[in-house]
Amino acid sequence: MEILYLVFGLLFLALYYIYEKQNHNNFRRKIPLVIHINGTRGKSSVTRLIAAGLRAGGKKTIAKTTGSTPRIILENGDEIPIIRYFSTNIKEQLKIFKFAAKRNIDILILECMAINPEYQWITEHKMVKSNIGIITNVKPDHLDLMGPGLKNVALSLCNTLTKNGITFTSEHRLFPLMKKFGEKQNTNLELVKTDSVSEKDMNDFSYIEHKENVSLALKVCEKCDVPQKIAIAGMKKVNPDIGAAKLFKIIIGRKEISFINIFAANDPESTESIIKHSKKLLPDINFVGIILNTRADRLFRSKQLIRMLRNTQFDSLYLVGEQTASMKIYARKHKISSKKIVDLGLLDEKNLVKTIEEIKGEKILLSGIGNMGGNGKIIVDFFRERNIKNV
């Protein structure tokens, strides 16, 4: 009898799988164009930029981001937060197809949710089946799953290359390797350069955006028959992801504090690049502080960033969050002077203000790095609520 129950159970599961698969395929067929965005950094930004550009060009577009705060971006630009009661699961993408198909849209844009290489392949080739793909870049992040080296990360990300379609990327270092991989599945992989975007266009954004992201978004809009002038005008009005690198200014006493939110730029290369860029934006500063938000489940990332800081000029390293003691030891082992390290532990607004008041200098730059979770969000909210000028 137990064997009979087992057989019936397996038969039921098989029939349910076939039913769900057919349902999803029907929803997929109702959406004329699907864009799938993968890469190490900038996925949420590129998703938002493309959606804004396509909307400006009259395309009925829905987008879904999985950034610091996952969102569904509707045809008119309004946003619906995605509430997750359980851990993140790639099956969430199936629900988005069902939602989008019922709205008779022209284009669906999805940010890739998967990190594990196998899940990346399943997401693209079994669920999304995109017409246009994007791999923003390849950087040393999530090396525990996609590593150990950059080549491995690149090949992992290539699991979402559009089969028999076109994929755009800004990754120039590993482009030859990716191109060769794409040829095996008849993917036209195209390298997008930044020369189509002017400095004036970049300065018009309300936050710190990257030329590579804008160039990728413009290329996709061009592919979808939206002229560059119209597309970039729409992009400049985009509502950035909460984790986007944005510069805030506040006044405490006689001190002018500029804070740049880099918590979402988790890999060392992106973090270092934005720190350098922010210094150029503020050439008259006389104190540079780094706030590293540590988490118990992100020790590997914290260690990466500390190693990066060995080659970065700064005056103080403020350790906040859950693992400050161990990261202080790690920083000292990696030749960061103990005089520069300040262990703040779990930080609240009162202690943050006290720390700023103790800084010697009237023009201060603080960069928040590591992770948005926990103390990261508290710090960002503090500066956002008191912001006097967006740079």
Image: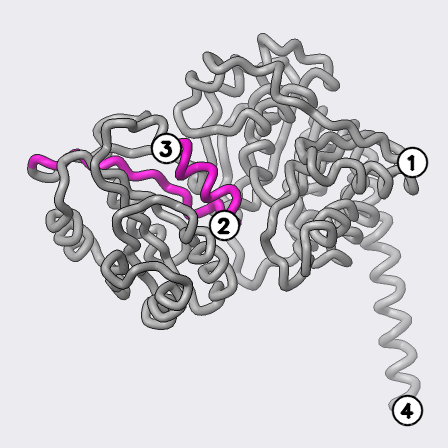
Compared to 97, does 324 lie above or below? below
Q: Find out whether the residues at labels 4 and 2 contact each other: C-beta distance under 8 Å.
A: no
256 is within the stretch colored magenta: yes
- First to last magenta residue range: 254-278
Q: CA distance from mark 1 to mark 4?
A: 50 Å
**Can I make out residue 102 in this image?**
no
Q: Secondary structure at mark 2?
A: loop
* Residues packed near mark 2 inside 10 Å, few (<14), some (14 to 19) or many (20 plus): many
Pointer 1 residue:
186
Pointer 4 residue:
1
Q: CA distance from mark 1 to mark 2?
A: 32 Å
299 vs 171, left or right, is: left
189 is within the stretch colored magenta: no
Pointer 3 residue:
278
Q: Find out whether the residues at labels 1 and 2 contact each other: C-beta distance under 8 Å.
A: no
Q: Secondary structure at mark 3?
A: helix
Q: CA distance from mark 4 to mark 2?
A: 54 Å
Q: Position of residue 26 (x, y in %)?
A: 83, 41
Question: Which numbered disc flags the more N-terminal residue, 1 or 2?
Answer: 1
Which one is closest to the eye, mark 4 or mark 2? Answer: 2
Mark number, residue 266? 2
Q: Position of residue 85 (x, y in %)?
A: 52, 61
* Residues packed near mark 4 inside 10 Å, few (<14), some (14 to 19) or many (20 plus): few
Which one is closest to the eye, mark 1 or mark 3? Answer: 3
Q: CA distance from mark 4 to mark 3?
A: 70 Å
Question: Which numbered disc flags the more N-terminal residue, 3 or 2?
Answer: 2
Q: Which amino acid type is marked by label 4? A: Met
